[in-house]
């Protein structure tokens, strides 16, 4: 199974492309599409709430195995630049760039745009990503895009196989009540293997729960390994107590005071103690305050772009995490580039 996030601004063509890649499913500020071809399953994630809010964009990226970065054939805009900054901070393992609406352009202009994209992404995680023109009208390269994503499936299976024996962690992205069933969550198995009747906890609220049943693509299963998108019926917990980003696992760290080893953004990565920021931890998000910043063990007054620092934070609410989880810091009031830094505990 492959989870692919379509990243781009309002005019990027990502939503039209998503509709051509699968059948629409769950809708909120993130819309899910599903496509099944033989043994291959594709879950497409479209953050429709972006660019109004950066939260759906971050969530979609953190829910995915592969990023499809969509750029309008007319060219790059400010939101494309913001997406590049965010992706370079998150450093996804797999990605492809698609020039959408290729039918509205010509081969010469497409080649010129490819060169601009290569210049814009030089020195970032996107630098080596393939650039593929697509059109939802002429259907140029739509099947090829699916094939490229599915070709990653074997690589992902090997990567996930190494995580299957680790303690299970499931990130919740949707939750609701179903008559006759009770609380149901939709989520993504980040690591480990979950089993029916397994007792587990919801973090950070530390609520005991039991997995009553597991579904994958509307089919009942007894277990689900790393990389699976799942629907879980839970016992002993109510939907009203859950939130997007809550984690199902046996053990997590929980806290509202963090010290992150951070790398700042290549552009507008400047902030200082006392600044209000927004903190993303997987699918969790909360406002927070910068308490202290150190560089090489010494306190400093502010960061610079493309720097390395230890950033001490106080978040408004507790977050659940484990060592190695990547946090993202943003400044919501900036109209153009809202991402500041990423870091681990």
Image (cartoon, rainbow, N blue to C red):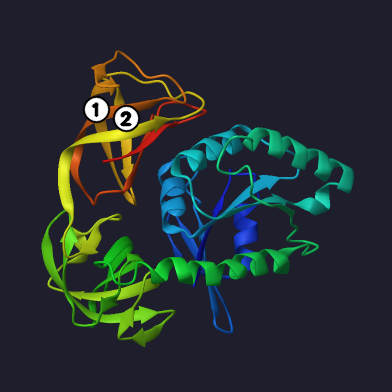
User: Which residue does the image show at 46% across and 47% down from the upper left?
Assistant: 57
Number of marks: 2
* Label 2, residues with CA under 10 Å away: few <14, some 14-19, many ≥20: many
Nearer-the-camera pick, 281 or 264: 264
> How far from the left and from the top, in percent, is residue 270?
41, 20
Q: For residue 201, which quarter of the picture?
A: bottom left
Q: Can you say whether 331 is above or below 21 in the image?
A: above
> How far from the left and from the top, in percent, is residue 269?
44, 25
Q: Which of marks 2 and 1 is nearer the N terminus?
A: 2
User: Which residue does the image show at 42% across and 19% down from the upper left?
Assistant: 304
The residue to which callout 2 is attached is 277
> How far from the left and from the top, in percent, is residue 289?
24, 27
User: Which residue does the image show at 64% across and 58% down from the upper left?
Assistant: 16
Q: Can you say whether 282 is above or below 115 in the image?
A: below
User: Which residue does the image show at 73% across and 61% down from the upper left?
Assistant: 136
> How far from the left and from the top, in percent, is residue 190?
35, 63
Nearer-the-camera pick, 181 or 266: 266
Q: How far apart are marks 2 and 1 (CA)?
A: 6 Å
Q: Can you say whether 125 is above or below 141 in the image?
A: above
For the residues bearing labels 2 and 1, Cβ distance under 8 angstroms: yes
Q: Is residue 178 visible?
A: no
Nearer-the-camera pick, 155 or 250: 155
On-image quarter of the C terminus: top left
> What is the number of the mark on residue 289?
1
Question: Is 244 positioned to the left or the right of 120 in the image?
Answer: left
Nearer-the-camera pick, 12 or 95: 95
Q: Residue furthest front?
A: 296
Mark 2 secondary-structure assignment: strand
Q: Which residue lies furthest to the top in this view?
A: 301
Q: Can residue 198 be seen in this view?
A: yes
Question: Is 162 positioned to the left or the right of 57 in the image?
Answer: left
Mark 1 secondary-structure assignment: strand
């Amino acid at each position: 199974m492959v989870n692919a996030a379509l990243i781009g601004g309002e005019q990027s063509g990502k939503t039209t492309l998503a509709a051509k890649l699968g059948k629409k499913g769950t809708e909120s500020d993130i819309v899910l599409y599903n496509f099944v071809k033989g043994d291959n399953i594709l879950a497409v994630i479209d953050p429709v709430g972006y660019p109004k809010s950066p939260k759906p964009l971050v969530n979609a990226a953190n829910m995915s195995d592969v990023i499809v970065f969509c750029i309008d054939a007319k060219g790059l805009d400010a939101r494309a630049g913001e997406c590049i900054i965010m992706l370079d901070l998150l450093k996804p393992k797999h990605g492809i760039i698609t020039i959408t609406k290729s039918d509205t352009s010509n081969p010469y202009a497409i080649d010129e745009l490819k060169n601009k994209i290569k210049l814009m992404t030089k020195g970032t995680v996107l630098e080596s990503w393939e650039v593929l023109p697509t059109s939802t009208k002429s259907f140029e390269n739509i099947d090829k895009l699916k094939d490229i994503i599915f070709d990653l499936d074997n690589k992902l299976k090997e990567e996930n196989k190494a995580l299957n024996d680790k303690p299970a962690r499931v990130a919740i992205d949707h939750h609701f009540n179903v008559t006759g069933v009770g609380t149901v969550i939709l989520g993504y198995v980040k690591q480990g293997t979950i089993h029916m009747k397994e007792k587990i906890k919801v973090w950070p609220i530390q609520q005991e729960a039991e997995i009553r049943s597991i579904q994958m693509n509307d089919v009942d299963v007894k277990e689900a390994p790393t990389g699976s998108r799942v629907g879980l019926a839970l016992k002993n917990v109510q939907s009203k107590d859950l939130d997007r980003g809550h984690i199902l696992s046996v053990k997590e760290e929980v806290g509202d005071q963090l010290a992150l080893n951070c790398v700042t953004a290549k552009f507008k990565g400047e902030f200082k103690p006392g600044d209000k920021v927004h903190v993303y931890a997987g699918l969790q998000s909360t406002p927070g305050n910068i308490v202290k910043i150190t560089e090489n063990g010494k306190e400093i007054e502010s960061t610079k772009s493309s720097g390395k620092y230890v950033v001490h934070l106080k978040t408004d609410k507790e977050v659940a995490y484990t060592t190695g989880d990547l946090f993202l810091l943003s400044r919501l009031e900036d109209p153009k580039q809202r991402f500041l830094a990423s870091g681990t505990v």
